[in-house]
Image (cartoon, rainbow, N blue to C red):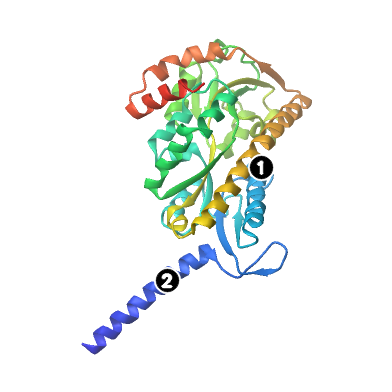
Amino acid sequence: MGKSLSMFTAGLLIGILLASGIFAFLLRQNHTGTDGAQSAGMVLKMGHCLDTTHPVHKSLLHMKKRLEELSGGKMTIDIYPSGVLGSEVQCIEQLQNGSLAMTKTSAAAIENFIPEMSIFGLPYVFRDSEHYWKVLDGKIGHDLLKLCKKKFLYGLCYFDAGSRNFYTRNKPVKKPEDLQGLKIRVQNSQTAMDMVEAMGGSPTPISWGELYSALAQGIVDGAENNPPSFTNNKHYEVCKHFTLDGHTRIPDMLFISTKVWNRLSQQQRQWLQQAAGDASVFERKLWKSESQKALKEAEKNGVTVYHVDTSLFAEKVKPMLENVKNPKIKTLLKDIKEVK
């Protein structure tokens, strides 16, 4: 009996130590700060998949700095970029099981966990950038963030990821009919495929890493993305036509694991939330300037940028919005339309 009890006690102690070890790893104490000074602060571990030149990564560095300022050095963030801690979905899963504190991910990747996030993949849901941010900064955006708590994800803020636009190799796209017969690379998303089909094109899912060679070899005639992605990945070397049709606006989102959030004090939560909000505002300004710079860079490399009548494109995909089956998405579409 005594031996069994001892074994049970030992097992219990091991379990407690393991659990404590996980949170000690996520919320390290006695961290050496960026200035090299030793501080008795809390360190949140964050992983994301963007490279260090991306506006969002620069904004996360701004958030880290603001958090240190607001907390007087009592809190900071260790940031691991470029997918070193796993893909977007893998980072989300690590937040859910409590093995990672924070991550930045596209709203598209959250669709698998929160179906309502598919609203962002639908074309022409937002009238323009101003309408988009009124929605995200308002009740609808906050409610969408709250939905994620049931999946152990606490949403802190949104980051701008721009609008997605068509770009092509040989034939310019000035109206939807110009897409007729063109093979357009899309993400592996049924909504994206339906959108391109509705406009008359032939959607072709190809991984992002293989896209440059697919364009160069003529496997596809074009693709769709935001200006920085187009320029930073040198797609202008192959595609000489960029159409500013802005068919979708899919934000990036910043999450903290609810298992970590629930362990923070009210004061620590306030510091973190304010730092995230400051970073979001910082990133929007940076994204705007980076997008303008990217388009100028593309034009310098022989790309023609087309400003088109987006209502012609929106009309083609109108049936997609009218035929949405999910009642929650239908309600969201109605509510978003009513935001002035």
The residue at which mark 1 appears reads as: 54
Report whether residue 115 is seen.
yes
Please report contact status of discs 1 and 2: CB closer than 8 Å, yes or no: no
Residue 305 place in picture, x, y as percent: 70, 20
Q: What amino acid type should be assigned to the residue bearing mark 1? A: His
Residue 323 place in picture, x, y as percent: 36, 18
Question: Is tag 1's residue or tag 2's residue first in the polypeptide sequence?
Answer: 2
Residue 69 place in picture, x, y as percent: 67, 55
Which quadrant does the N terminus fall into?
A: bottom left
Q: Element at badge 2?
A: helix
Q: Residue at x 79, y 26 (%)?
A: 300
Q: Residue at x 45, y 31 (%)?
A: 189
Q: Residue at x 43, y 51 (%)?
A: 93
Q: Is residue 29 above or below residue 258?
A: below
The residue at which mark 2 appears reads as: 18
Q: What amino acid type should be assigned to the residue bearing mark 2? A: Leu
Q: Is residue 119 above or below residue 59?
A: above
Label 1, residues with CA under 10 Å away: few <14, some 14-19, many ≥20: some
Q: Residue at x 38, y 35 (%)?
A: 115
Closest to the observer, 252 or 33: 33
Give the CA distance from mark 1 to mark 2. Answer: 36 Å
Closest to the observer, 316 or 239: 316
Label 2, residues with CA under 10 Å away: few <14, some 14-19, many ≥20: few
Residue 152 place in picture, x, y as percent: 40, 50
Q: Element at badge 1?
A: loop
